[in-house]
Amino acid sequence: MELDSSDKLSHTTRGLHWLIALTIIALWGVGWYMATNKVYPLYSWHKSFGILVVLFAVVRVGWRIKNGWPSALPSHQQWERALSKLVHWLLIISTILMPLSGMLMSAMGGHGLQLFGLELFPHNPMPDNPQRNMPINKELAELFHSVHGIAAKVLLVSLVLHVAGALKHHVIDKDNTLKRMLGR
Ligand code: HEM
Ligand code: HEM
């Protein structure tokens, strides 16, 4: 299988990067919008696409272990290498932590886990009112709810730094950093 080289990133790296990047940006926007405005019909879509991210993320982490991180370009300064490494780690950790905390929050909150209608984990109906759910473990549900909210903020800050870095390389340094991720 094709691996990354310093002037060309493989199809696998680019495909996984953009598939996950676009899904995560969309989930971030939908998550924030639905939670702020209490748009409940969006919750099941947010959760189903969020669960899919776990599958992509496992493949990506496997790929990083096999391929290593893309090597820096010779023009990248020492401080840029250190900062980008930190931000890439924060992004990868968020890619795992966001869906994981979301799934645990829903499951522990008694709402179950459904992937586009397919039940992965059963909901927990109230004995005297089966139309409503009750938490399996309220403390854990609240803990994972907080983790989801905090990780969302860390993800947003990392993403702003990440995109600013990509644009700086493209517009100010005029190097190949963004181009090689776009496959040009
Ligand atoms: C419009 C948004 C985005 C742009 C323009 C962008 C751009 C880039 C570029 C140019 C690189 C290559 C850096 C290098 O060669 O050292 C890169 C790598 C990376 N990006 Fe993004 N990115 C975006 C969104 C995201 C998102 C949402 C994530 C969150 C998961 C993410 C995670 C990563 C990671 C982990 C790497 C390291 C290399 C890899 O694992 O493939 N990016 N990005
Ligand atoms: C990469 C994947 C995900 C991202 C980026 C993401 C992002 C977000 C964001 C930004 C919010 C708004 C947080 C706030 O305003 O406090 C949110 C809320 C929420 N997310 Fe996710 N999420 C992801 C995956 C999941 C998954 C897999 C589930 C469950 C299976 C889930 C369940 C929820 C729920 C229930 C809320 C609403 C919480 C409330 O009403 O306060 N999320 N998500």
Image (cartoon, rainbow, N blue to C red):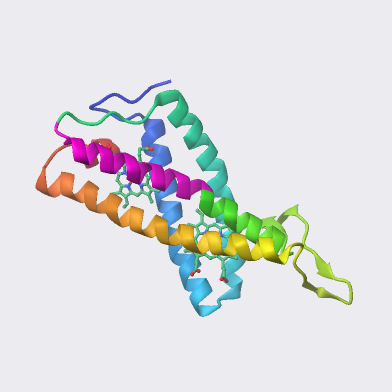
Looking at the image, which residue sits at the far right? Answer: 128
Ligand 1 shows up in the quarter that is top left
Q: Main secondary structure of the magenta part?
A: helix
Q: Quadrant of residue 47?
A: bottom right
Across and down, in percent, residue 124 comes to 80, 64
Residue 27 visible at all? no
| Image side of residue 171 versus residue 156, left or right | left
Give the residues in magenta.
75-96
Q: Residue at x 25, y 35 (%)?
A: 180
Q: Which image quadrant for residue 176?
A: top left
Above or below: residue 36 compared with residue 19: below
Is 106 part of what is drawn in magenta?
Answer: no
Whether residue 89 is in magenta: the answer is: yes
The residue at 45%/60% (across/down) is 152
Give left or right: position of 109 versus 96: right
Depth check: 64 or 41 in front? 64
